[in-house]
Image: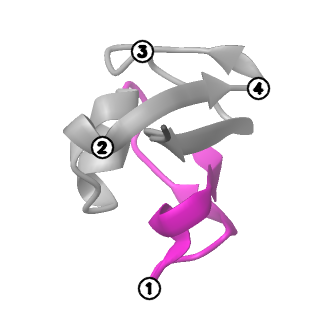
Amino acid sequence: MKLTVKLFAHFRDNRFVSEVQEYPNGITIGEVIDRLGIDRDDIGITMINSKHCGFSDTPTDDDTLAIFPLVGGG
């Protein structure tokens, strides 16, 4: 299954901005994040095709996954 993964902010450091990657069918968003070496506790928002999703959701072929970090401020 082809999945376009888009990373934002510091998640891009030493990785990529946007990349099409191959994943097995049935993989969860959480498993994709784990394979990217991103700590799940650092995730603020995940979206599939511009709609909010959770770690247990599964993308389908040609979906776009966007991963945003937590945002802090004061």
- Which secondary structure lies at badge 2? helix
What type is the residue that disc 4 sits on?
Asn
Lower sequence index among marks 3 and 2: 2
Crowd band around label 2 with a 10 angstrom C-alpha radius: few (<14), some (14–19), many (20+): few
Cα distance, mark 3 to mark 4?
A: 13 Å
Lower sequence index among marks 2 and 1: 1
Cα distance, mark 1 to mark 4?
A: 24 Å
Mark identifier at residue 66: none
Image depth: mark 2 or mark 1 in front: 2
What type is the residue that disc 2 sits on?
Asp
Percent across and percent down for residue 73 are: 49, 41
Up the image or down, 12 lies above or below 33; here it is below
- Which secondary structure lies at badge 3? loop
- Which secondary structure lies at badge 4? loop
Percent across and percent down for residue 44 are: 45, 32
Which residue is at the front of the view, 15 or 41?
41
Instruction: Give the magenta part as a residue range.
Output: 1-27
Residue drawn 48% across the image and 37% down it: 74
Lower sequence index among marks 2 and 4: 2
Image depth: mark 2 or mark 4 in front: 2
Mark identifier at residue 14: 1
Cα distance, mark 3 to mark 2?
A: 14 Å
Cβ atoms at labels 2 and 4 below 8 Å apart: no
From the viewer's perspective, tell me whether residue 10 is left or right of residue 42: right
The picture quadrant where one finds residue 36 is bottom left
Task: Identify the residue under disc 4.
Answer: 49
Mark identifier at residue 54: 3
Q: How many marks?
A: 4
Lower sequence index among marks 1 and 4: 1
